[in-house]
Amino acid sequence: MDKVIICINCPVGCRMNVKLAEDGSFLSVSGNTCPRGARYAEQECTAPLRMVTAVIPVSGAAVPLSVKTSVPVPRESIGGIMKQLSLLSVRAPVSQGAVIVSNILGTGADIIATRNV
Ligand code: SF4
């Protein structure tokens, strides 16, 4: 099975052709200009990762707190993370960079405040 993906690791945006086995396992990639593209292609086709961003309510503040994961998380965990975040609220003040949830859902990612509230 062939798949075309665009590398997003730098502005060049190499168009890569990925060959996958019938079981979905990674076979090869072409079209990448550097090894980062090859690593991205294999990761994206076998175990895609995404950064998660969200906002959560803050008691004592008029605006919600924007948060993000400290590192990309498995795409299939995003729904569970968003559900857990929907149950949260924090109390002001919160500093940018504060850890709101550590190791959310065992992904190894922390939920981090992206600004001061
Ligand atoms: S393969 Fe390398 S040069 Fe091409 S977009 Fe990815 S990081 Fe940039």
Image (cartoon, rainbow, N blue to C red):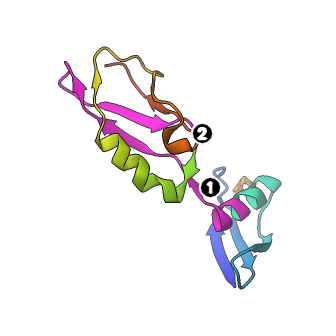
Foreground: 109 or 96?
A: 109
The mark that comes first in sequence, 1 or 2, is: 1
Instruction: Classify residue 42 by image quadrant.
Output: bottom right
> What's the residue type where badge 1 is placed?
Ile
Q: What residue appears at the point 82 percent right and 55 percent down from the top-left corner?
A: 35
76 or 33, nearer to the observer: 76
> What is the crowding at mark 1: few (fewer than 14 residues within 10 Å), some, or many (at least 20)?
some
- Any magenta on residue 51? yes
| Residue ranking furthest to the top | 93
Q: Element under label 1? A: loop
Judging by the rendered image, the residue that carries numbered circle 1 is 8
Left or right: 16 as drawn, with respect to 82 = right
Q: Is residue 116 above or below residue 47?
A: above
Quadrant where the C terminus lies? top left
In this picture, which residue range is highlighted in magenta?
42-71
Dot 2 alpha-carbon crowd within 10 angstroms: few under 14, some 14 to 19, many 20 or more: few
User: In the image, residue 12 lies at what x, y percent?
Assistant: 67, 55
Point out residue 75 in the picture as x, y percentages from the top left corner: 52, 57
Q: Where is the N terminus found, in terms of image quarters?
A: bottom right
Q: Which image quadrant is residue 16 in?
A: bottom right
Label 2 C-beta lies within 8 Å of the nearest ligand 1 atom: no
Judged from the image, the secondary structure of the residue bearing numbered disc 2 is: loop
> In this image, 13 relative to 78: left or right?
right
65 in magenta:
yes
Residue 92 bears which disc, if any? none
User: What x and y, as percent, mark residue 9?
Assistant: 66, 51
User: For the residues marked 1 and 2, what is the alpha-carbon distance in whole angstroms?
Assistant: 23 Å
Q: Is residue 67 left or right of residue 57?
A: right
